[in-house]
Amino acid sequence: MGVTVDKRANKRIAAIAGAGVFLLTVLVVVPWLLLASGRGDLMSVLTSVALLSVISSGVWLTFFIGRINIGQGAYALMGGYVSAILVVKYGMLFWWTLPLAGLFCAAASVLIGLPILRLRGVYFAMVTLTLTEVARLLAQALPITNGPRGITNIPPPGALEVFGVTLIPDFAQLANLRLGFYYLAVVLMLLCFAGMWRLVNSRLGFLCRSLQQNEELASSIGVNITYLRVLAYAISSFLGGVGGAIFAAIVQSIYPATFQIQESVNYMLYCFLGGLGYVFGPMLGTLVLYVGWDLLFKTGAYQLLIFSSVLIALILFLPNGLLSLRLPGRKQPH
Amino acid sequence: MEQIIVNGLYLGAQYALIALGLTLIFALMNVLNFAHGQMYVLGGYMTYLVYGLLGLPFALGIVASAVTLLAVGAVVEKFLFRPVLKKSAREESSMLLAAGLAFLFDSIILLLFGQKQRGVPKIMDGVQNWGDFTVVLPNDKIVVGVCTALMIGAFIVFMQYTRPGRAMRAMAQDRTAAQLMGVSVDRYGMLGFALGAMLAGIAGGLLVAITGVSSGIGGPVSIKAFLMVMIGGAGVVPGAIAGGFILGMMESFGLSYLRAYGDITYLVIFASLMVFLSIRPHGLMGKPWG
């Protein structure tokens, strides 16, 4: 008895310590190191990694209920456009458009998800793939999105004030805009993954796991599978929309080609590479693939060749993701 | 009107040939081959190499494409897909592998042949017309269309009446049962994958005579092939053929009737496909939950 309690307490302490070290690293050590060494460009890379991992974690959640989602690019594009249109055409404050973009995507995903979530396996994958293409073509055809020319010159996020207290300073007056966006992306990533961790280890998470294993069985013992899968899909799309909105704010523009099938496939790859059985898989997968791709830039024409060969080798030797790599003596969590 | 139908039929035959390979691979291995479009492009370049650059007969170019892709398919199945499918906890991992392969082929094609659009000399001159120019078709398109139709026919005969064809159909229906009946699933899986790749290569080789080939078209071709397979139902041979012809017709009609409203043909096709699939989730004749 005493031994198990001890073990559990130890595990808990280890987890808290790990989380603390991670927080300290991403919030203090990494920005300080980058600023001290004058590598501000790397900061943009890490900002992108943080944002992409948020978007991919949405894809991961749909994997968690047993669906292959290649449509996340559609929601990222939608979120980007909603935020951009609200900011540019209606003069709304960026910080309010952020949740609105997420909610818009979530609402859209409920409407789209109700019929298409009845599909499974490759059928769902293919429909979501076409969804990405539909979103791109829609953005090209609709008048409000300004066609292929897109929306450019989106102003940086303004100051957020509540009762005269400035919660978030005006990004246009920041001494270091990159640092501002870095913190925005990293805080969002932390919130997203903390929420995701909580969700997966809650009752809801276990119900989702039952969907992944056997929907009929889950349904027969009283799990409301329609509600659950639409909910999971809506959360996933919410994350996609928020990520896309921040992306549009960072590059200050959005085009129909900003999020295409290539991006949707990439989000899926990030999840796969990190490991589908692990909440933090998308984070690691995004970091490795995105930074790896950037590092290979110097190899010029051979970039794609080396990148894809490494990718194939990884999947060949670690088909269950990077996080399935364990130190000897530690047992698999699942 | 007649011209639109003829164009649709011609386009549909080619699409069907591409979709057949994809659906064969899916039926046997349960692998969604993301690299299918790239295999098609590779086939196109092989024909370009043999017929366009070396000046050998066009038929030889097609044979070269077929043989190359047959080998590529077999190697890819034996050394990549089979071990991954055996080791991986979730079947979807094969999709990552397929996407990685698509990148790999893309980069190899780019390194070997560059970015430029490549064309070959016309395989045949002249134009045929019927009914006082209501229907006009160039001779080379007719030759390619007939070749495509012959290939589709030969494939169906092969699947229906030969021993390996029967074995593969049994595998597609129920892999375990086929194995219990003494079908060597490893061998026929490899053969099926190689044949699927070969069909893509032949389609690419035939089409190079009409439209030429360029390194960037692999991805879009894959997506079109996915569409056709979805329309007809994944893993079903007649479904793939039907899907190919339906998409060909839709494209042909869309491009001539919807042009007035701007570039929305594909938007309409994709959107109607999504509606169609939510009403009929497994396509026209697919087995449920492929």
Image (cartoon, rainbow, N blue to C red):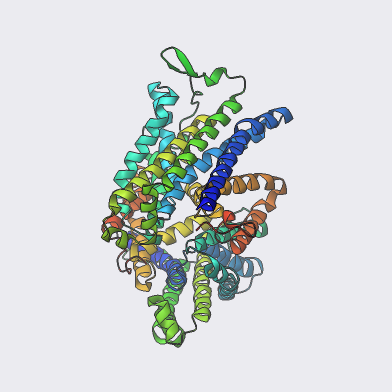
Taking A296 as reference, is B10 above or below it? below
Residue A190 spot, x, y in % from top left:
52, 37
Camera-nearest residue between B208 and A227: A227
Residue, x 51% and y 61% (percent of image)?
B93
Taking B9 as reference, is A8 above or below it? above
Classify residue B9 by image quadrant: bottom left
Residue, x 65% and y 44% (percent of image)?
A294
Residue B56 spot, x, y in % from top left:
63, 73
Camera-nearest residue between B245 and A159: A159
Instruction: Give the number of callouts.
Output: 0
Camera-nearest residue between A104 and B232: A104
Q: Residue furthest front?
A: A2
Residue, x 40% and y 31% (percent of image)?
A99
Taking A164 as reference, is A129 above or below it? below
Residue B121 spot, x, y in % from top left:
58, 64
Camera-nearest residue between B279 and B94: B94
Decide if residue A258 is in sight here: no
Decide if residue A16 is in sight here: yes
Q: Residue furthest right?
A: A37
Q: Residue furthest top?
A: A164
Q: Is residue B221 left or right of residue B246?
A: right
Residue B21 spot, x, y in % from top left:
46, 70
